[in-house]
Image (tube, grey):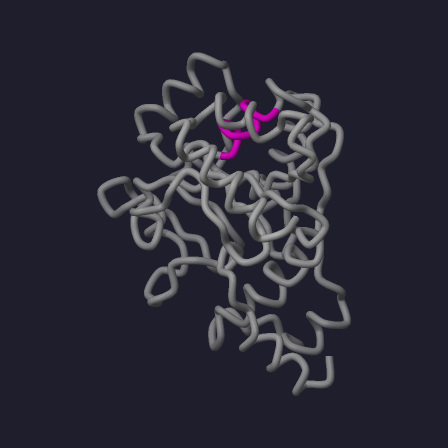
């Protein structure tokens, strides 16, 4: 996909003011010729986006990363949603064991260098798989705050067009979707986990603290880096370690 065509697609979808199911339908339309995948964590809110995808094309590739540190409940929930929606192309991505052991031999990297931990366990395997696609559909929302507060519904990011169909959704909109569409809920939400990542970096929180307050608590880190265009720093570090 050349730069001019990418810009044309972004401009067209933005001009039409699409979001939600309408945006998903436009992006997955077969006549675009674009190779599209969905990026999903199978976390607390993931069912809402996957429901939109399933209404259009259950064969859409879904990229999800298994860091080796996921909650057992998340793995079980992934299987539940795949079955519920009839998704036929869910790709579970993992970093090589050699790489992980070389960079994080004692499993404590998340304490000293959480960005590096995310880079190796999550960002790198995702980036490798995502390289086969022109467009990535994500579940990011503005109400999550931080760098997501001004996120557009469609934008260019690195080599990809990023599409965020739920960007304008509020907490109330998500709850309505769960109820109206009878969507399965992640079992950890009822236990107080509002945003769910790895076991070592996810804590219970309350809505008054912010949806993502339970991620990397006590650290300045707020994102895993999955949707950041630049990854050069950590690639260099792994090269220095001979990996």
Left or right of 117 in this view: 101: right
x, y (%) of residue 162? 51, 45
x, y (%) of residue 28? 62, 28
Q: Nearer the viewer, residue 200 or 22?
A: 22
- Please tell me how many numbered marks the rendered image carries: 0
Asked if residue 186 is positioned above or below residue 221 in the image, the reply reads above
| Residue at the (65%, 79%) spot, across then down | 238
x, y (%) of residue 80? 64, 28
Q: Quadrant of residue 56?
A: top right
Q: Nearer the viewer, residue 31 or 203?
A: 31
Residue segment shown in magenta: 46-53
x, y (%) of residue 236? 61, 81
Q: Nearer the viewer, residue 221 or 1?
A: 1
Question: Which quadrant is the C terminus positioned in?
Answer: bottom right
Left or right of 208 in this view: 136: right
| Residue at the (43%, 42%) spot, across then down | 140
Asked if residue 62 is positioned above or below residue 200 in the image, the reply reads above
Left or right of 165 in this view: 123: right
Q: Quadrant of residue 89?
A: top right
Residue 183 magenta: no
Left or right of 60 in this view: 161: left
| Residue at the (42%, 28%) spot, across then down | 19
Residue 48 magenta: yes
| Residue at the (37%, 23%) spot, across then down | 175
Q: Residue furthest left?
A: 208
Task: Look at the magenta stretch and give its main secondary structure.
Answer: helix
Q: Residue furthest front?
A: 4
Q: Quadrant of residue 18?
A: top left
């Amino acid at each position: 996909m050349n730069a001019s065509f990418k810009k044309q697609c972004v401009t067209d979808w933005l001009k039409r003011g699409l979001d939600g199911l309408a945006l998903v339908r436009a992006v997955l339309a077969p006549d675009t010729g674009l190779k599209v995948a969905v990026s999903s964590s199978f976390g607390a809110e993931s069912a809402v986006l996957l429901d939109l995808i399933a209404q259009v094309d259950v064969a859409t590739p879904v990229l999800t990363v298994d860091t080796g540190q996921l909650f057992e409940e998340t793995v079980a929930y992934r299987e539940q949603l795949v079955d519920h929606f009839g998704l036929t192309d869910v790709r579970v991505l993992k970093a090589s064991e050699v790489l992980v052991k070389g960079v994080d031999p004692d499993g404590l990297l998340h304490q000293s260098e959480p960005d590096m931990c995310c880079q190796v366990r999550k960002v790198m395997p995702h980036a490798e798989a995502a390289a086969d696609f022109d467009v990535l559909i994500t579940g990011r929302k503005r109400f999550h705050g931080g760098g997501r507060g001004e996120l557009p519904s469609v934008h260019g990011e690195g080599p990809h067009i990023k599409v965020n169909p739920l960007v304008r959704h509020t907490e109330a909109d998500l709850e309505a979707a769960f109820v109206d569409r009878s969507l399965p809920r992640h079992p950890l939400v009822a236990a107080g986990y509002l945003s769910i990542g790895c076991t070592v970096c996810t804590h219970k929180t309350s809505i008054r603290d912010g949806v993502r307050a339970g991620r990397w608590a006590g650290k300045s880190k707020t994102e895993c880096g999955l949707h950041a265009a630049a990854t050069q720093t950590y690639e260099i570090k792994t090269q220095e370690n001979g990996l």
